[in-house]
Image (cartoon, rainbow, N blue to C red):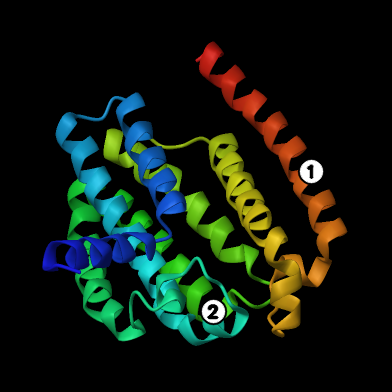
Amino acid sequence: MNNDLRHGARLRAFVSATHFPQALAMVLLMTIGTAILGGSWSSVALVFLASAAGQATVGWTNDWHDAAADRAAGRGNKPTVRGELLPGDLRVPILVSATLTIPLSFFAAGWVGGAAHIAAVASALVYNFYLARTVWSWVPYAVSFALMPVFIAQASSPALWPTLPVVLLSVLVGVTAHLVNAIPDIDIDRATGWGGLAVSLGKRRSIVLGVVLVIVGLACFGVVVTDVLMG
């Protein structure tokens, strides 16, 4: 394998270790949300950079921290399991992305909005290091998604704040996403002795809870749309 191919494969491994589909979805959500709410081009660009740095930090930290457990569980979708990266390869990227997240967040959304984004990333790190395998695994999702609308709104305009229904809708989306992501891995997680809300509930009750959250979320979305139309 020549150097170009080797470097390309390594770059793809680093991108994959960010949990790329989920990371991209979050970056696009925050960036497009800022644009829709009237943020300037510079604000939109800074939100893109700040959210990308934050999501990379979360994804890389997860793969670094869980490398041994992922190998034991045979999670072949992880670069650290496939042997494309060593856990230690992620340390410098984590340090760089985490360091960049802080100033970029403040530049994008001011002191309040920037602090909200940094706190959301910190909450996700609490999930990675402490709560992912406990019955409280849903809490960091609720916290991070509750803070996200504050970041988006403040990046759009310092005078703009999310309404309570918007924050509640965001929380419901976050917790639902957590369940949807965890349900397929319930059997693997249980076999390896890992916890998590979905493991604690079991597949059937997790699906029921997910359906309930979707129904409540749709009702909340209706309230948000009504507020927008009447506003």
Local crowd at mark 2 within 10 Å, few (<14), some, or many (≥20)?
Answer: some
Q: Residue at x 68, y 56 (%)?
A: 179
- Residue 62: assigned label: none
Q: Which amino acid does the dot numbered 1 rest on?
A: Val
Q: Position of residue 132 (x, y in %)?
A: 59, 74
Residue at 66% x, 49% y is 176
Q: Number of marks in the image?
A: 2
Instruction: Provide the residue designation for mark 2.
Output: 70
User: Where residue 27 sits in the image (x, y, percent)?
Assistant: 36, 46
Q: Nearer the viewer, residue 192 or 127?
A: 192
Q: Is residue 144 left or right of residue 115?
A: right
Foreground label between 2 and 1: 2
Whether residue 158 is visible: no
Residue 78 drawn at (x, y percent): 46, 69
Q: Residue furthest right?
A: 204
* Residue position for label 1: 211
Q: Is residue 13 placed above or below 39 in the rendered structure?
A: below
Is residue 105 among the parts visible in the rendering? Answer: yes
Residue drawn where x is 34% and y is 74% of the image: 84
Q: Position of residue 119 (x, y in %)?
A: 39, 63
Quarter occupied by residue 20: bottom left
Q: Which residue is at a point 40% across and 65% down the rendered structure image?
A: 59
* Label 1 SS: helix
Q: Earlier in the sequence, mark 2 or mark 1?
A: 2
